[in-house]
Image: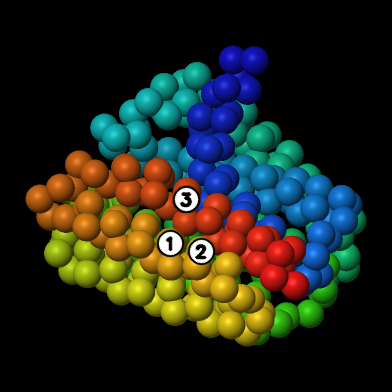
Amino acid sequence: MNKFRLFCKMIKIEHSLFALPFAYIGLFLANNKWPGIKPFVLVTIAMVAVRSYAMAMNRIIDLKFDRKNPRTSDRPLVTGELTLTHAYLFSIFFAIIFVLSCFFLNKLCFYLSFFALVWAGLYSFTKRFTTLCHFWLGSVLAMAPLGGWLAINPSFHPADVLFAFGVLFWVAGFDILYAIQDIDFDKSHGLFSVPSRLGVSPALWISTMCHVITLIFFFLGGWVAHLGAIYFLGLTLVSAILIAEHVVVSEKRLDKINVAFFQMNAFVSIIIFFSVILDLFISR
């Protein structure tokens, strides 16, 4: 039980709230109704598995930096509560679970599962060479609505692509905010991030612009998917949350980053999800 708790701590299991609802959005939109128990369960397993794999790989790849960064000094791999062997076995196990889940969905999901593993795994290296690392992370989570859609309908559609781009810029926006915490560490260790390369003020501005673009894509996604008033009411609430996030975090209030990162952004995906579901089941 203690090892289970440590593994959950290593991968920050609570952050699954960010991507999982968007996978469900793709799943429901592709079917315009309840997709059935089999795809729902398989998509859930696949999402938890690929995220667990990606986070474990991130902890393995970044271990030498995590050991030096005071903010990450309590991570299980750093403290020695978990070993690299534990982490490698964990990531391999969940990579296999992910591929098997995709295999039982359909052929296209199975073939794309290998690309998804590589793409998610490579993210951890991007901070070593590009300030676009935040957008790479966004592209990893953007696979959630695409994967949910393809689980039902193995062909791309403008609606799921628009939602995917919305997720990409949403994640990039809040990851840029989160990276401000490590601005001094990243500078001293030659790591790339928008805050470390451009400064706090430009980072805040770019993060804001990312979330403006997010709302545009979510609006277009809902419009192309023929969603109605309930969805757009939910999107209005999400807009208010994102505005509040950028009001809360400023150059003089950087201590509020964790509040904006988790508490506010967790609500974004949940509200968008329930807005889509309610719109599908009540308005139609």
Does the image show residue 120?
no
Horizontal side of 161 relative to 251 (left or right) equals right
Q: How dense is the environment of label 3, judged by Cα within 10 Å: few (below 14), some, or many (20 and up)?
A: some
Camera-nearest residue between 170 and 30: 30
Camera-nearest residue between 35 and 237: 237
Identify the amino acid type marked 1.
Answer: Leu
Q: How dense is the environment of label 1, judged by Cα within 10 Å: few (below 14), some, or many (20 and up)?
A: some
Distance from label 2 to label 3 (Cα)? 11 Å
Horizontal side of 4 relative to 34 (left or right) equals left
Quarter of the image that includes the N terminus? top right
Distance from label 2 to label 1 (Cα)? 5 Å
User: Do the CB atoms of the residues marked 2 and 1 lie less than 8 Å apart?
Assistant: yes
Q: Is residue 148 above or below residue 72?
A: below
Q: Which residue is mark 2?
A: 234
**Mark 2 or mark 3: which is in front?**
2
State the residue lying farthest toward the top.
Answer: 2
Q: Which residue is mark 3?
A: 267
Q: Residue at x 88, y 52 (%)?
A: 38
- Can you tell which quarter of the image residue 223 is in? bottom right
Quarter of the image that includes the C terminus? bottom right
Determine whether the residue tagged by mark 3 lies in a helix, strand or loop: helix
Q: Residue at x 40, y 43 (%)?
A: 263
Q: Which residue is mark 1?
A: 237
- Where residue 227 sits in the image (x, y, percent)? 63, 76
Identify the amino acid type marked 3.
Answer: Phe
**Mark 1 or mark 3: which is in front?**
1
- Where residue 66 sits in the image (x, y, percent)? 36, 37
Q: How dense is the environment of label 2, judged by Cα within 10 Å: few (below 14), some, or many (20 and up)?
A: many
Q: Residue at x 82, y 73 (%)?
A: 153
Determine whether the residue tagged by mark 2 lies in a helix, strand or loop: helix
Identify the amino acid type marked 2.
Answer: Gly
